[in-house]
Amino acid sequence: MKTWAEIQAIKADVNAKTFSASAPGQYRVLVGLATCGIAAGAMPVYDAFIEAAAGNANCKVAQVGCIGMCQYEPIVEVVEAGKKTTYVKMDAEKAARVYQEHILGGQVVTDYLLVENGITCQSLEDTTFYKLQKRIALRNCGIIDPENIDEYIARDGYAALYKVITEMSSQDVIDTMLASGLRGRGGAGFPTGKKWSFAAANQAPQKFVCCNADEGDPGAFMDRSVLEGDPHALLEAMTIAGKAIGAKQGYIYVRAEYPVAVKRLNIAIAQAKEYGFLGDNIMGTDFCFDIGIRLGAGAFVCGEETALMTSIEGKRGEPRPRPPFPAVKGLFQSPTILNNVETYANVAQIILNGSDWFSAMGTEKSKGTKVFALGGKINNTGLVEVPMGTTLRTVVEDIGGGIPNGKKFKAAQTGGPSGGCIPLEHFDVEIDYDNLIAIGSMMGSGGLIVMDEDNCMVDIAKFFLDFTVDESCGKCTPCRIGTRRLYELLEKITSGEGELDDIDELEALAAHIKDNSLCGLGQTAPNPVLSTLRYFRNEYEAHIVDKKCIAKVCRPLLTFTIDPEKCVGCTKCARNCPANAIVGNVKEPHVIDHEKCVKCSVCMQNCAFGAITKD
């Protein structure tokens, strides 16, 4: 166990040697080794720098979490005298050149810098992607080595826990959280302080603090990035929560599909125990708190709080009726609080900076910032943290860099399978909990999928329903049967067999599922259908009445045609057609037999002359 004086000495030492402006000629090389970086080939880059810098006391190489701009991975940042240079799309060969020319030669390798709108950026901090962000939950991601507790300490790590233990009562902590206005970042947006106060008021002999790290929405990777880049922030916050409600045990329920996050969490827990931040007599006091990890098996329903707790108990992950709510009877029938990773990532900063600091950001009813995993038809993909109230247009056009290939924005899906689509008419909506609900969507955990004019909104609704049907636990009939029936109706419509009455049936069935499902998964499952019907009913009607898919996505409704003016008779389309549906002589225009055509689009993909179109 370390004394607080020893912790302060560590902080001063690491800041002086690592984070403070170092002398010219001294370098810190940061390699993004989150899952996104590793998948893009960052390990050979890291190994190349380690090998090159071996024996060089003036060059320290460190792994960091997600730096943020995922489409440019592998990313390397070189820091010298407080100045940062960002290299993108790196490989081992490029790493060797950067080491020789930049580290040893003092010259920036401009060939590997990011270019935004024709302007070369010295670092990612010079890009619009970063300038419009405000990082709180992500404050350490891409900056510290997540496997080095000393670097977390140097960035004020565990100072909030020390303040809570030495200066604040449990009620002081809860009052601070209430005054901050922090709402749960996992989806519903329930006030964090209120949830903690309910559990604290319960006088049960045993209580629990749980973390939902079972991030299952398609396109969502916010929590994973925090776990991989700043695991101690979660441990510190959960320990503070334990002190606030009177709990001695915490559990992190994390997806087994997140091996990097699990590894770093285990390392962080061991380090925290060694330093005296976890375990018995924390920081020399009589406060005891421990944290364990429980791995989820990939069931989306286990993101629902009662199903998650049931799974931790070793049972099949199915939701339980509420009430009683977890603050009364949760894990092992004891009072329990559950927040997700991003929610906890804000806690220490609120304690250190005060509730007024946090509540000054955001909107009247949605305080602070929100992290989004920005993906889909967007130029800049990655992690984005912006103040609540930032408009969708700002996120998509400014931070996200707009839609690629000159296409037009059509919609954005927020909240994953539980959310809804935001159309162009609401492009200037200020993103917060209440505004999104008012237009038929929801915040969700933070996945934000951008769609352009080439997306079919009926097909999008079908995609999310397919996911929900597969992930339903089957415990209640409205969800188990109702979602499948919704999917069958969408399949019927996209196959060209729909009738106008199907739209009425979709709406009636969706309302029944929302009102009668047992848990949040079933209650929100119809949202993609309802939101696309609300804003894109014309596309449903075109599928049914005109037997046309406006976006030319739904294959059963497509017709492929060869333009005789453009076809040169090369025979490539005919040779590659799996149905032998194309006929014609060499050097003469070919024709598609629509009776045989299976509408696979292989002919279009193989035509080098643009002679084949789909309608």
Image: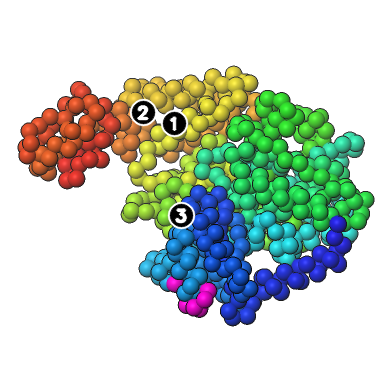
Kindly identify the residue that appears in the image at 33 percent across and 22 percent down: 497
Residue identifier under label 3: 71
Q: Main secondary structure of the magenta part?
A: loop
Residue depth check, mark 3 versus mark 1: number of the one nearer the observer:
3
Q: Quadrant of the C terminus?
A: top left
Label 3 or label 1, whichever comes before in sequence order: 3
Q: Is residue 234 magenta?
A: no
Q: Can you see residue 144?
A: yes
Q: Nearer the viewer, residue 448 or 470?
A: 470
Q: What kind of element bears circle 1?
A: helix
Q: Is residue 548 left or right of residue 132?
A: left
**Tag 1: residue type?**
Lys
Q: Quadrant of the N terminus?
A: bottom right
Residue identifier under label 1: 462
Q: How far across and down, in percent of the image, does residue 339 sit?
A: 71, 43
Q: In which quadrant of the rendered view does residue 248 lie?
A: top right
The magenta segment is 103-109
Q: How far across and down, in percent of the image, does residue 525 sit?
A: 55, 31
Asked if the residues shown at circle 2 and circle 1 are in contact, with their CB atoms under 8 angstroms apart, the answer is yes
Compared with residue 578, is residue 119 higher up or lower down, i.e. above or below? below
